[in-house]
Amino acid sequence: MGDAADWYRWDGTDLLLRLRVQPRAGRSAFAEPFGDALKVKLKAPPVDGRANAELLRFIAERFGVSRSAVELVTGQQSRTKQLRVKNPHQLTLGIKDARAGTGDEQ
């Protein structure tokens, strides 16, 4: 399995995340590392951009930033995505939850 250093890195004050999404899950939550990415389960289906929108909202909430501070850099139509989180406020909480596979939402 991957190490945390594989799925996140810093670019100045921005945090870059490499994520592997699983749409149509029972709930939105961080899951286990998946190779060099972190798996994120999303309740939304991959239809009309709904899974991407939910991913951006979920990450913004977990890292304590506005939705506009989270950018989908690559992977618009792929399960593997790279996100940029601008100046995250809750880095420790977000990374801790991701490492623990928590951050559940109903």
Image (cartoon, rainbow, N blue to C red):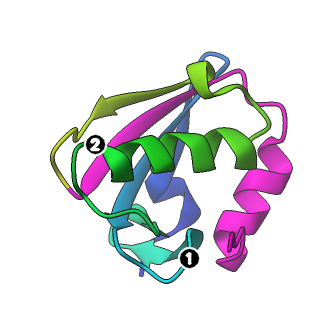
Q: Is residue 29 above or below residue 15?
A: below
Judging from the image, what secondary structure is the residue with disc 1 in?
loop
Check disc 2: other Cα within 10 Å, few if <14, some if 14-19, many if 20+: few
State the mark number for residue 27. Answer: 1
Residue 66 occupies quadrant:
top right
**Residue at 35% in and 48% down:** 50
Which mark is first along the chain, 1 or 2?
Answer: 1
Q: What residue did someone put label 2 on? A: 49
**Residue at 36% in and 45% down:** 52
Task: Identify which amino acid the numbered label 1 is placed on.
Answer: Arg
Q: Nearer the viewer, residue 71 or 38?
A: 71
Q: Where does the magenta region start and end?
A: 79-106
On whether residue 82 falls in the magenta region, the answer is: yes
Q: Tell which residue pokes out farthest to the left in this image.
A: 77
The N terminus is located in which quarter?
bottom left
Residue 74 occupies quadrant:
top left
Q: Tell which residue pokes out farthest to the front in this image.
A: 48
Horizontal side of residue 87 vs 42, given as left or right: right
Judging from the image, what secondary structure is the residue with disc 2 in?
loop
